[in-house]
Amino acid sequence: MTLRKLTILPTGTEVLLPAGSPLTEVEYETPQRLIPFGCRSGACGACVVEVLEGLGALGEPDDDELDFLEDLGRTGGNYRLACQCRLRGDATVRPATDL
């Protein structure tokens, strides 16, 4: 099993997950609530993250996700809904609530 590293700022917490894991798995790997997951279906916007490194490692966003991010004012290509991402490579993210 290949593990991938997700670094979550501002704490610098590193979480190792099997390649292809949804980012929602972070909740089960750490005692802290590092990413605020809400609905888990891409409808609430609670889990918006800014991707600082490894944007391609989180898979491609679909049109619905991009439209919703635009509605939230999170444009520019470096924002994702964490609940819609699967970790395919190493990445560093920061919850948008910390921006």
Image (cartoon, grey):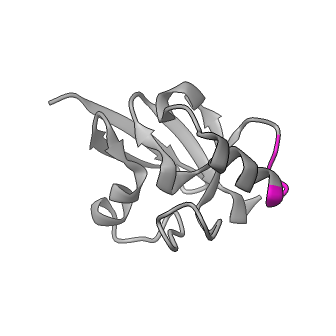
- x 47%, y 66%: residue: 40
Is 95 on the left-hand or right-hand side of 32?
Answer: right
As rendered, which of 55 and 71 lies closer to the eye?
A: 71
Furthest-front residue in this view: 63
Viewer-nearest residue: 34 or 49: 49
Q: Position of residue 83 (x, y in %)?
A: 48, 56
Q: Nearer the viewer, residue 57 or 16?
A: 57
| Residue 97, above or below 50 | below
What residue lies at 33% left-to-right and 57% top-to-bottom? 25
Q: With respect to residue 50, does 55 lie above or below?
A: above
> Residue 73: x and y, percent?
85, 56
Q: Main secondary structure of the magenta part?
A: loop
Quadrant holding the C terminus: bottom right
* Image quarter of the N terminus: top left
Task: Write down the region rendered in magenta.
Answer: 71-75
Q: Residue furthest left?
A: 1
Seen in the image, is 59 located left or right of residue 62?
A: left
Question: What x and y, as percent, mark residue 29?
Answer: 29, 59
Where is residue 23 shown, x and y percent of the image? Answer: 41, 51
Asked if residue 73 lies in the magenta stretch, the reply is yes
User: Which residue sits at x=70%, y=65%?
Assistant: 97
Residue extending furthest toward the right: 73
Identified at 70% across, 45% down, the residue is 66
Q: Let me know if residue 51 appears in the view.
A: yes
Q: Which of the 4 image quadrants contains residue 98?
A: bottom right
Rendered position, 15 above or below 72: above
Is residue 50 something one can see in this rendering? no
